[in-house]
Image: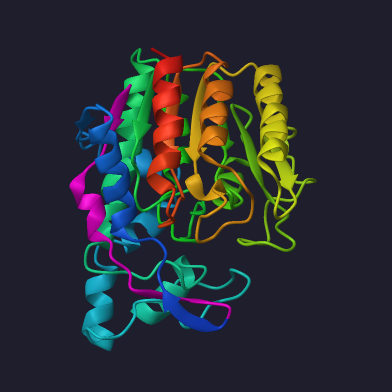
Amino acid sequence: MKVFFDERQLGHAPTHYFRRGAAMPHQEQPQRAEILRDMLIGEGFEISEPQDHGLAPIKAVHNPDYVDFLPDAHARFVESAGPDALAIPTMHPGVRRGKEPKDIHGQLGWWMTDTSTPLTEGSWDAAYWSAQTAIETAQTVATGARAAYALCRPPGHHAMRDCSNGFCFFNNACIAAEHLTQTFKKVALIDIDVHTGNGSLDILYERGDIFFCSLHPDPATYPTFYLGHADETGEGDGAGKSLNLLLEQGASQDEVLALLDKGIAAIRDFGAEALVVSLGFDMAADDPLAAVKVYPDGFAEMARRLAALNLPTALIQEGGYLGPSLADNAKSFLTTFREATA
């Protein structure tokens, strides 16, 4: 199974964000990717750098104006606020009416929904190469590989069409799925990160060629809130093509696996020809953002069940933070998937 990663993805190094009214250390650290990278090397995976596919595949999914805002946003912020200020929005337009302002502080609020995606000096390169890693993985699958894994960091599944959200700048999984539609008529995207794939839902809600399924706790009471309710099933061409499967907080491994089976059955019913997996190891019982209780053997079983779909599959890394079992969970899933698709 081919693996892709670019060291420039380590350049995004946020220190703090605001949660529950307080500044706290940022959970999405470069060490996450280093731990996964080192595990992959230790397990004999060969890691390749992605090619540069340019901005076009990113802009096929995201508002081009949002994409164009990001490359120099941090430099403009530092010029305005100084190097010690935290590059996060401090004002928002509320309902998106009016026009994008020209001032960098107003623009941050226009294109960023929360405080979780502070810009640092290396954020643009990290987000760009995270997206390129996903594109390369999709291209590898589209040209005949049974499976490939994108070690994407920062993650992507909370990023909406025209804004960052929840640690995410570009929606890597949707970019990969869009790329696969150039080869396959029907693509499925299943999100097994513990948080709602709210950005993916936003992007895919009216599409009939990409089926979207997300397993997550009820967004009425668990972040990222707002999107991911059971009655959100798609509109227009996408009617019936979105499926949100809700877990109770504290759900057991068996309960997670039972819900995964429902998602897999729906993918079969859709007639998917290729699969994208938003792969989050924050389903782990000991993850710093834990809400359910999955253990290494559970991740291995998730891999077996997804591999049994027997579809060309692009695995796109999402969450999974600096908990004690991160490497073990990743090892269980990825080595099992490799064996099942060899």
Q: Nearer the viewer, residue 28 or 212?
A: 28
Residue at x 39%, y 26% (from the top left corner): 335
The C terminus lies in quadrant: top left
Compared with residue 159, is residue 141 higher up or lower down, i.e. above or below?
Answer: above
- Left or right of 129? Residue 325 is right
* Magenta-colored stretch includes residue 13: yes
Specify how the rendered protein is coloured.
rainbow
Q: Residue furthest right?
A: 231
Q: Is residue 40 visible?
A: yes
Q: Is residue 158 left or right of residue 145?
A: right
Residue at 44 percent across and 48 percent down: it is 325
Numbered range of the magenta stretch: 1-20
Q: Is residue 9 magenta?
A: yes
Q: Is 263 in front, or is 291? A: 291
Residue 38 percent coordinates (x, y): 25, 42
**Of the pair 243 and 260, the residue shown nearer to us:** 260
In the rendered picture of this protein, how many numbered marks are placed on residues? Answer: 0
Residue 247 x, y percent position in the rendering: 73, 47
Image-quadrant location for residue 102: bottom left
Q: Is residue 139 above or below residue 278?
A: above
Q: Residue at x 20, y 31 (%)?
A: 48
Q: x%, y% of residue 175?
A: 42, 38
Q: Please tell me which residue is depicted at 51% across the width and 83% down the height of the picture.
A: 22
Quadrant of image for the N terminus: top left
- Residue 103: tell me if it is visible: no
Residue 9 place in picture, x, y as percent: 25, 51
